[in-house]
Amino acid sequence: MNNKKKNSPLKKILKWFFILVLVVLIALVSIPFLFKDKIKEIVARTINENVNATVTFKDIDLSLLKSFPLANLTIEDISIANKAPFLGDTLYVSKELSVNMNIKELFKTADETINLKSISTRNGKINIIVNDKNIGNYDIAIPNEKVVNDTSTNDPFSFNISNYEVENIDFLYVDEISKMKVGLSKINHSGNGNFANDILDLDTNSETFLSFEMDGVNYMNNLKITLDAIIGIDLKNSKYTFKENTGYINQLPLEFNGFIQLFEESQLYDINFKTPTSTFKNALALIPEQYSGNLNSIKTEGNFDLNGVVKGTLSEKTIPTFNISLLSKNAMFKYADLPKSVENINIDTKVINTTGAVKDTYVNLNNLTFTIDEDEFTAKGNVANITTNPKINMAAKGVVNLANIGKVYPLALTNELAGILKADITTNFDMNSVEKGTYQNIKNEGNIAVTNFKYEGEDVAKPFIIDKTSITFNTNTIKLNEFKAKTGTSDLSINGSLDNFYGFIFKNQILKGNFNLNSTNLNVSDFISKTSTETTKKEETTASTVKIPAFIDATFNANAKNVVYDNIILKNVSGNLYIKDENINLKNVKSDVFGGNIAFNGNVSTKENISNFNMDLNFNELNIADSFSTVEMLKSIAPIAKTIEGKINSTINVSGNLNDDMTPNLKTISGNLLGQLLNTKLKASNSKVLSALGNKVAFLDVSKLNLDKIQTYIAFKDGAASIKPFQLNYKDIGITIGGKHGFDQSINYDLTFDVPVKYLGTEVTNLITKLAPKDAETVKSIPVKGSLSGSFSSPSFTTNLKDATTSLVNDLIEKQKQSLINKGKDALTDLINKNKTTTDKDSTKTKTKTEEKVRGLLNGLFKKKTDTTNK
């Protein structure tokens, strides 16, 4: 009993504790629903009263649990889109924008200021644009003149924050006036500090990737930047001072000192930075981590110092002066797992501006040297007027054994490089001369030569070897003195000149040139890798995978003794190729092939989504069977030709689309063929069509058809070929053939035979012999019509020979009948004339006798007719 009394207070405490917890939990869950509408009202009012932009969001969520003991307000899928003059641009978009505040702030009215404690945003983009009229898209605040003298007006929110966070945000700044782009990708940044104080220390952590582009030239691409720094902030004076900090550019450590102070129309800089150590490993740390290899295993000697000073005012007219230097003397490095080292490294480079005028910025490369084994390379030069009209003055000289590159530096090469590079060049030019094409202002001298270069990889079918190449630099052109290479069984020899090289390199202008190309053997398969072939077969697309470069405007004068394309061998190939605007124009191309020769002109274009071609071809005494059974396009145009032995002279005009592998798409080709056959002979056994024709027509031996000098005209379009009727002879039989066939092997031919009557049998010839000579002369032959249908593999042939013969027999019988009747009439006339002198007295008796004689004569004639018919 006593124990029970002792436990009862504890039970009561626990009971009320659980009730309190339950009430708090209910409150934490339910209170957000009570205040959600009020928060939406405040957000909407803030947007409408302060922002000249289109702001949208998916929803607003208020939670007391997410950031307990603070209340959390989260705006989901928020977007701020600009209005004119930046209509269509997005200033800010984010999956989530969150703020935290004390719970008591929720109980304020909609007109009272709500104090925010922290703010964060994640997974979004910020795009800042300054157009050519110096207007920024970020200036979206609505001017509110009434608040200037009305101190009673409160802002809806007060940013009295102590921390903030930015996670996975992309930032892009575009200045159309200076043609500058600055990009920060994957920004992760956070800061902690008491912003309630005018003077505070802000503890920041930052990580991002920096890209920088000026006037179309990319100077930095995804340069990794990290900075952990304590920044002293003086809010009253807008002054920010670097205190304790550690920063990295890629893997290069840097320390910063100094401050930045913001004024209404300018910024004051007084900053210096340096590497905390002087080891040469710092130089390699500038290289992105994925390319620099394991720096922990590297051995270095000598120094590398990067330091700089930035001091002065940034305004519309001036920039801070600066002096940034990179110095190294007698350094070396060697990776532990590589056999060779780079030695005698000397670097002396400065980036300087001493006046504060942007145009006076310049870069001096006073010295760059290094050696690998006995090979030494040196370079020096300078770039002035960087922001106005850059003037470039450079010189380089040395020897590099390409095989050593993979032995001193951890390059991810599937196959090792090989070859010797020798260079001795100087160049002096300004960018205005490049842009305007005033090449007389460009001063270049020297040459570059490569010998015994070898390259292997998945992107080439076979090892590519450059025996020797030499390039000479002149004022107006770059001359390719020689280029001798081989791959597989193929060899190439090229020489010529390049025009507008600097416009191509620096201004993305068209590269112009004129070259001579020679080869003793050129096998196309040596230049097509298996990888690209397999990819082409797997990927079905309406657009051609091979594109003629749009940046080339060049002429090639080509000669090749032997060219192998698939199973076609071309001999003594010559002609001119003009490449321009994604087109190749072929002029006067000639070749010996298929026992004759071919000449053609035409065009191939990959400018449109689907590549196309147009060709005019001229065949001279080509072997018919070889050419029309080997070339797929010719095989489709005239499938029957593969059964013909002999030669052909022909002109062909053909156009259509190209497949991904640059072969004609037979379903799209159109054009015509005019050909003449020479010294021909048919092989009927090779064709089911000819065999069917020979089997169905007893008087025709197909193998003895005379095709010599026959001319044919074929028009083809939409996957079908139409043959204009043409004539050929078989002995004394005339044959006319016409019709059409499809590229799908379907056929529909009409044939007309002029058949002499002697081939129609004894019945017909006997009838003819009984005709009068003048009638017999008119019956020499009859037309017999035939129809060939079905397909080349399963043909069907029919004729009207039986009907034509029957019709002829009936016609002959009719002629014989008329001949006999005419004989009867003649006999009757003679008889009447003979008895005309008889007296009237005997007229009745004579008339009776005459009628009897005529009746007997007619009976005899009809009897003869009947007998003849029965015979």
Image (cartoon, rainbow, N blue to C red):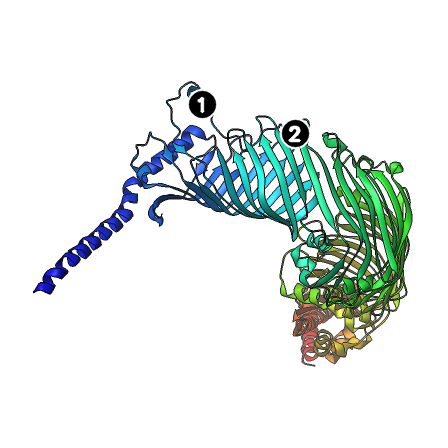
Instruction: Work out which quarter of the rendered image holds the C terminus and state it.
Output: bottom right
Q: Amino acid at mark 1?
A: Asn
Q: Residue furthest front?
A: 2
Instruction: Work out which quarter of the rendered image holds the N terminus and state it.
Output: bottom left
377 and 434: which is toward the camera = 377
Q: Amino acid at mark 2?
A: Thr
Q: Residue at position x 51%, y 44% from top?
A: 203
Element on which disc 2 rests: strand
Q: Quadrant of residue 300?
A: bottom right
Q: Residues within 10 Å of mark 1 (few under 14, many from 20)?
A: few
Gap in angstroms between the C-alphas marked 1 and 2: 31 Å
Q: Residue at position x 86%, y 40% from top?
A: 428
Q: Residues within 10 Å of mark 2 (few under 14, many from 20)?
A: many
User: Mark 2 and mark 1 in contact (Cβ < 8 Å)?
Assistant: no
Q: Quadrant of residue 383?
A: top right
Disc 2 marks which residue?
313
What x and y, as percent, mark residue 594? 85, 68
Q: Residue furthest bottom?
A: 871
What x and y, as percent, mark residue 551? 76, 47
Q: Quadrant of residue 701?
A: bottom right
Element on which disc 1 rests: loop
Task: Judge whether residue 341 can be spotted in this image.
Answer: yes
Q: Residue furthest left?
A: 1
The mark total stands at 2
Which disc is residue 113 wearing?
Answer: none
Disc 1 marks which residue?
144
Q: Is residue 767 left or right of residue 575?
A: left
What x and y, as percent, mark residue 46? 40, 32
